[in-house]
Amino acid sequence: MVSPTIAATEAEARAKVARFAAAPNFEEKALVGISSNTEIDFKQFDLDEPLPADLTTNGERGSLEHFMRGNGAPGPKTLRELVRERTTRGLELVGTADQVAEKMGQAMEEIGGDGFLISRGGRDLSREYITEVCDGLVPALQRRGLMRTEYTTSTLRETLREF
């Protein structure tokens, strides 16, 4: 799952990321997604205390393990540290639509796979974001041959079976 940040220039895209991280409710919004996946209400924990090492879930265990690992540095981490690390690790897709498409293509060449699942990453989904992806990123991916320009089947079931 990726959460690209797209703008007319790389500087504008980086400014968007900075504004999101500086928002007063940043931690709360960032925890919504991980709470949804893990079925853990993180409001019960102090942001500035380490999470219990024995934290378990009936939700997605892999998501919880990935989140709690943080950036891989040793030692217990506070919830606030884990949230901040989560926004800066992994495949960084920040820039113009062409820059982001190029990075996505490089990642596919390096690690393989059959595509990306695009998410807003804890931020509010907006018409602006959908437009940036649909009118900017999708055509950039299509120009590189990384995304189809038409479907070869007539139903969703048939389309999914192609993979």
Image (spheres, rainbow, N blue to C red):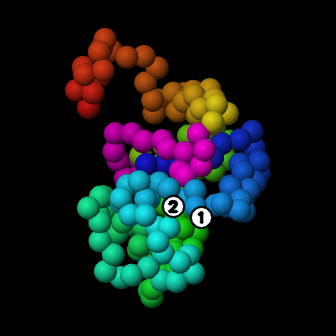
Q: Residues within 10 Å of mark 2 (few under 14, many from 20)?
A: many
Q: Which mark is residue 27?
A: 1
How many numbered circles are shown?
Answer: 2
Q: Residues within 10 Å of mark 1 (few under 14, many from 20)?
A: some
Side of 144 relative to 14 (left or right): left
Mark 1 lies on a secondary structure that is helix
Q: Is residue 110 magenta?
A: yes
Q: Position of residue 51 (x, y in %)?
A: 44, 79
Taking the spot 48% from the left edge, 48% from the top edge, the residue there is: 2
Circle 2: residue type: Leu
Please state which of residues 23 and 44 is positioned toward the viewer in this rendering: 44
The magenta region covers 109-125
Are the two marked residues, 2 and 1, in contact with CB atoms closer than 8 angstroms? Answer: yes
Please state which of residues 41 and 60 is positioned toward the viewer in this rendering: 41
Q: Magenta: predominant secondary structure element?
A: loop
Q: Position of residue 119 (x, y in %)?
A: 49, 44
Residue located beneath label 2 in the image: 31
159 over 65 or under it: above or below: above
Taking the spot 29% from the left edge, 66% from the top edge, the residue there is: 57
Taking the spot 67% from the left edge, 47% from the top edge, the residue there is: 95
Image-quadrant location for residue 101 = top right
Is residue 104 visible to us here? Answer: no
Q: Position of residue 46 (x, y in %)?
A: 53, 78
Q: Identify the residue at the far bottom of this view.
A: 75
Taking the spot 42% from the left edge, 42% from the top edge, the residue there is: 116
CA gap, disc 2 to disc 1?
Answer: 6 Å
90 over 94 or under it: above or below: below
